[in-house]
């Protein structure tokens, strides 16, 4: 194991541990391991919440609407063709993007040492 910091971009895209870049981040589709299997980094403090879903909605929405407009202008198919094309396309694009976006946001949390907001104690001021 090297001590050189790993890029948040590559660890996010490969869905690997943000510290070592070796251990897998997910044990299921989106469920995190409790800790890294390689460097034992504790994953319990990481929470990307709805962040990845927002990015995926914007990107998938843009892709689907742009593709639907292009298909409509060029081929002018009936509405059932649009439904048969764009509903599965939306689901597939969203599923493909969700894991890397969640891993990237977790890697950014690790790199920036981000944590949930708290009220400061009187002694901290
Ligand atoms: Zn690790």
Image: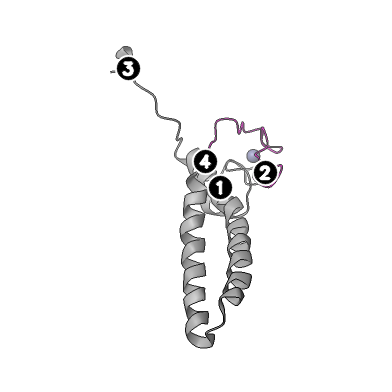
Residue 33 on the magenta span: yes
**What numbered label is drawn on residue 48?**
4
Mark 1–mark 2 Cα distance, whole angstroms, equals 10 Å
Mark 3–mark 4 Cα distance, whole angstroms, equals 27 Å
| Residue farthest to the bottom, as pictured | 74
Residue 124 on the magenta span: no
Front-most of residues 54 and 28 = 54
Is residue 7 something that shows in the picture? Answer: no
Q: Quadrant where the C terminus lies?
A: top left
Mark 2–mark 4 Cα distance, whole angstroms, equals 13 Å
Magenta-drawn segment = 25-49
* Residue at 63% from the left image edge and 54% from the top image edge: 14
Identify the mark nearer the N-term, 2 or 3. 2
Element type at marker 2?
loop
* Residue at 48% from the left image edge and 44% from the top image edge: 108
Residue to which mark 3 is pinned: 124
Count the marks: 4
Residue to which mark 2 is pinned: 26
Element type at marker 4?
loop
């Amino acid at each position: 194991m090297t001590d050189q910091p790993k890029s948040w971009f590559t660890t996010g895209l490969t869905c690997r541990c943000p510290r070592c870049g070796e251990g897998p981040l997910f044990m299921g589709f989106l469920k995190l391991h409790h800790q890294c299997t390689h460097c034992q980094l504790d994953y319990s403090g990481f929470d990307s919440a709805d962040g990845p879903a927002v990015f995926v909605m914007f990107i998938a929405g843009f892709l689907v609407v742009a593709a639907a407009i292009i298909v409509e202008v060029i081929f002018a198919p009936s509405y059932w063709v649009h439904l048969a094309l764009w509903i599965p396309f939306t689901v597939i694009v969203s599923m493909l993007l969700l894991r890397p976006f969640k891993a990237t946001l977790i890697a950014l949390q690790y790199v920036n040492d981000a944590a949930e907001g708290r009220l400061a104690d009187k002694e901290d001021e």
